[in-house]
Amino acid sequence: MAALALAACEAPATEPASAPEGASAEAAQAGFAPRTVGTHSVKGVLLAFEDVSWPAYYDGLEVGPAGAAVGDEGNLKLGSLDPEVGGPVAPATIQPLIGKPVEVRYTVTTEHRMVDLLINGASILPRVEGEPAPPADAKTIQGVLGGADTESGDLPSELTVKAPDGTSVTFEAFVAGEMTSANGRTVTLRYEDDLATTLESIAPASQS
């Protein structure tokens, strides 16, 4: 995961997240780990961490309140990049914290996720047999595609579709095949908005 997102605003959470099963009444009342767009800090227990391998580890961290178990609804799941590609924390620093109280700082941002890319009404994305069709209610913008001049490497490329009126949508995708020939041409992008939760820092929680 590497994540492309709109700039996060420093807004406080206004809606509490649902408390995981088995969490304390205090945690349930307070709401554990806000999911509103912005940068937040939370104290909890590092329940799990998976180093997916270079160059990135995604959704590898899971933090919950005391008494929570791995997989409980309401736990905070985080993705991050390896420091070699700009990430904030090395996996070797995170591993010793598993099962211990931690303080996590994280950012929630909105991402645009491509679900289809069309030229003259025809999709240029490869389709896997049995794969569901793009959702009918996906958002749409028509304009010139930029950033797809070369195929992607280990990480996705940052692409932009700019409409004639100056509005644009920027998103990340792996560029391959016909997508390179679409660069600089008028395309129709179909996309959805997702929330991405990204690690900023993690440290042992101070004992109060």
Image (cartoon, rainbow, N blue to C red):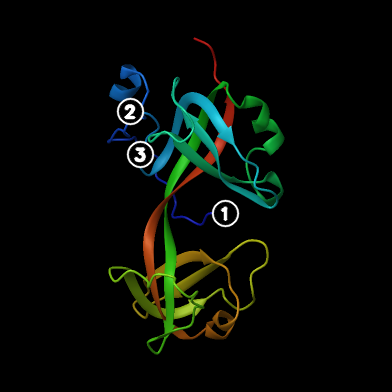
Q: Is residue 73 above or below residue 139?
A: above
The answer for how far apart the CA atoms under marks 2 and 1 are is 27 Å
Count of marks placed on residues: 3
The answer for how far apart the CA atoms under marks 2 and 3 are is 16 Å
Q: Position of residue 151 (x, y in %)?
A: 64, 74
The residue under the point 44% across, 70% down is: 131
Q: Position of residue 206 (x, y in %)?
A: 54, 15
Mark identifier at residue 2: 1
The residue under the point 40% across, 42% down is: 38
Residue 137, quarter of picture: bottom left
Asked whether 108 or 129 is in front, the reply is: 129
Direction top: furthest residue: 208
The residue under the point 40% across, 40% down is: 10
Identify which amino acid the numbered label 3 is placed on: Ala
Q: Which residue is mark 3?
A: 11
Q: Position of residue 32 (x, y in %)?
A: 38, 29
Q: Which residue is mark 2?
A: 31
Badge 1: how crowded within 10 Å, few (<14), some, or many (20+)?
some
Badge 3: how crowded within 10 Å, few (<14), some, or many (20+)?
few
Badge 2: how crowded within 10 Å, few (<14), some, or many (20+)?
some
Q: Is residue 29 above or below residue 111?
A: above
Q: Position of residue 171 (x, y in %)?
A: 48, 64
